[in-house]
Amino acid sequence: MEKAVKILKANNIRITPQRLGVYEILSDKNKHLTADDIYRKIKISFPSISLATVYSILELYHKKHLLNEIRIDFDKSCFDSRTETHHHFLCKQCSKIYDINLQPCPALNAKEVDGHIIHELQGYFYGICSECKEKK
Amino acid sequence: MEKAVKILKANNIRITPQRLGVYEILSDKNKHLTADDIYRKIKISFPSISLATVYSILELYHKKHLLNEIRIDFDKSCFDSRTETHHHFLCKQCSKIYDINLQPCPALNAKEVDGHIIHELQGYFYGICSECKEKK
DNA sequence: TTTTAAATAATAATTATTCTTGCATTATTT
DNA sequence: AAATAATGCAAGAATAATTATTATTTAAAA
């Protein structure tokens, strides 16, 4: 049995071609895709799919913790198949998003801050990426 | 001379009653107000002000670093007069936003991560706040 | 295979934010 | 102080990401 099918079944998610398609696209690691990016990609194999379906699949996967949703770029969400907590960097020049690994960050493994229970955390960095820095 | 006037002048911002009004509302520390919150508050003293004006004043203040814009709640920005870097917590139950102070965070004073230049950073925590935790 | 609950396509609705335009106000220069 | 130039404002239209609605189709259990 295919890996995607196995994982969806393990999470009590009904198998549909559209869901498998979105899953495959997201398996492309280290990418940070918007709903529209995914829509455009999946349209190649499922020309009749609608953007609302993509959104509903993404919401479902997010609820099941199969993906990570980030909002580093204010007006659109990006989706990421790396589900362990990690931070992100957005280059103001080229708009590229990078994964960041901060090892000794006290928040990363904490369960609480100031008495509040942490379910999830996001670290967003903004600036000029190393590539753009070189170009100048 | 009033403090607000002094600060605006120091930043080469033309003084207008609307700008002073927004400034006063934002001086209310430890609040995290949306553009619409500010609009509703300032409408009391300036009934003819428009929401677009509020947005343009907020954009101006942000550019001049007189305020901090956060997007912890995905679909609306909040504005905060504390301009030193600090993190935030959003309670999924009551939707309240709290300021968080993480002292020994390696990112906080860093100029770079992975070779990328950091201009700004935001730490967002999501979960259940101490108040809501107690209530149960 | 039949049944039934859930998923999808298509489209409309929503909502925060930005853009546009004509007018009013303020600053600058004379 | 008057004239001119620059900027700010109100009002409403436009944009764009996301969500809601509904009729139809499909997956999977019986």
Image (tube, coloured by chain):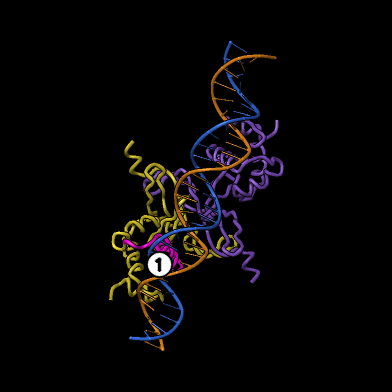
Chain colours: A yellow, B purple, C blue, D orange
Quadrant of the frame with the C terminus of chain A: top left
Name the magenta segment's main secondary structure.
helix
Q: Is residue A60 left or right of residue B36?
A: left
Whether A40 is drawn above or below B120: the answer is below
Q: Secondary structure at mark 1?
A: loop
Judge whether residue A65 is colored magenta.
yes
Q: Which residues are magenta?
A: A47-67
**Front-most of residues A122 and D26:** D26
The residue carrying mark 1 is: A66
Quadrant of the frame with the N terminus of chain A: bottom left
Where residue A106 sits: x, y (%)?
Answer: 49, 58
**Front-most of residues A66 and B99:** A66
For disc 1, the neighbor class at 10 Å (few under 14, some 14 to 19, many from 20) is: some
Whether A123 is drawn above or below A22: the answer is above
- Quadrant of the rendered structure where residue B49 is? top right
- Identity, as a three-letter code, of the amino acid under mark 1: Leu
Judge whether residue B72 is colored magenta.
no
**Front-most of residues B72 and C27:** C27
- Picture residue at 61% right of the left edge, 33% below the top: B8
Q: Is residue B88 left or right of residue A68?
A: right
- Picture residue at 37% right of the left edge, 76% below the top: A9
- Picture residue at 64% right of the left edge, 45% below the top: B39
Where residue B130 sits: x, y (%)?
Answer: 62, 64
- Picture residue at 48% right of the left edge, 48% below the top: B121
The chain letter for the residue carrying disc 1 is: A
Viewer can see residue A43: yes
Whether A78 is drawn above or below B22: the answer is below
Where residue C26 sits: x, y (%)?
Answer: 64, 26
